[in-house]
Image (spheres, grey):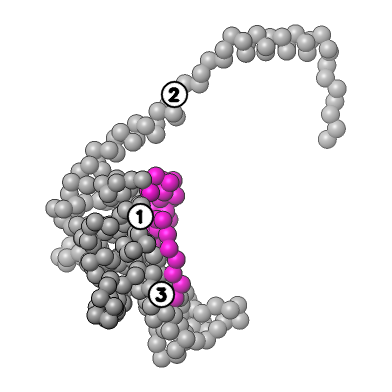
Amino acid sequence: MFRNQYDTDVTTWSPQGRLFQVEYAMEAVKQGSCTVGLKSDTHVVLATLKRSQSELSSFQRKVFKIDDHLGIAIAGLTGDGRSLCKYMRNECINHRYVYESSMPVGRLVRLVADKAQVCTQRSWKRPYGVGLLVAGVDSQGPHLYSTCPSGNYYEYKAMAIGSRSQAAKTYLEKHFETFPGANLDELVQHSLRALQASLSEGELTDANCSVAVVGKDLSFTVLEDQAVEPYITALKEDEPMQAEAEAAPEGGEAPEAPPAAEAAAAEGDERREDEGPAPMEAD
């Protein structure tokens, strides 16, 4: 990656007002495996791609349970993600010990964002090279948050981060209006379709993806391997039907003009012949 005199530490600003170390951390998130999150009025679903360094190694886990009511999916450096996961678990335990209740999702996300922001103003630290999708349910309903190495965080209806996430975002933007009233199975299917759109090669299988669900009446549950297989099978069965539905408008013939339209066109031709040549128009 291109280096210059303004990226030696995180507290040095460039003349254009940029912090290159923070931008490098955000680039690490973009190069991580794709992660998709979406929510309805009752549930939140996370779906991630699991990568392996070689055919001899196992797939890296990208989904972590924080508490019974929330969990995270990561994109970027897995080591930084595990570090933040440990911090979030400790905060949830402390909050439950002091207040005897589960921690609100928004408060925990704000603490994580503050922790990430501190790393952007200390010269002896580096930003966390990981982005989080935080899914949880509290007294205010289901929530889906996305955090950034810069310390920013936002709440979303649906979001995708990581490598080739723009293709997944395009799918989510087309269908997000149907998410609020969707049931859990439909949400999982939408998340897998968005995840499949981000694949550059190969296909989605139960070995290279994992799904996590949480809802008002459902604790945070991670679905992997055989638990995901029924959803993958249903996804492959729906693909031919969707392809036919998309190809039908394109392959159909143009409708013939009604007799009334043909008569009106004939009358117009007769009028133009009687009126003579049309006047010249100015450029």
Q: Secondary structure at mark 1?
A: strand
Q: Secondary structure at mark 2?
A: loop
Q: Residue furthest front?
A: 100
Disc 2, disc 3: CB below 8 Å?
no
The residue at which mark 2 appears reads as 252
Disc 1, disc 3: CB below 8 Å?
no
Whether residue 38 is situated above or below residue 235 in the rendered picture? below
**Amino acid type shown at disc 2:** Gly
Q: Residue at x 18, y 62 (%)?
A: 55
The residue at which mark 1 appears reads as 39
Q: Position of residue 54 (x, y in %)?
A: 20, 65
Quadrant in the picture for residue 70: bottom left
Q: Secondary structure at mark 3?
A: helix
Residue 258 can be seen, yes or no? yes
Does residue 156 belong to the magenta stretch?
A: yes
Q: Which residues are magenta?
A: 151-180
* Spatial CA span between label 2 and label 1: 36 Å
Between disc 2 and disc 1, whose residue precedes? 1
Q: Quadrant of the C terminus?
A: top right
Disc nearest the viewer among 2 and 1: 1
Between disc 1 and disc 3, whose residue precedes? 1
Crowding at dot 3, Cα within 10 Å, few <14 / some 14-19 / many 20+, comes out as some
In the shown orientation, is residue 151 left or right of residue 71? right
Quadrant in the picture for residue 162: bottom left
The residue at which mark 3 appears reads as 110
Q: Residue at x 25, y 51 (%)?
A: 204
Q: Nearer the viewer, residue 80 or 87?
A: 87
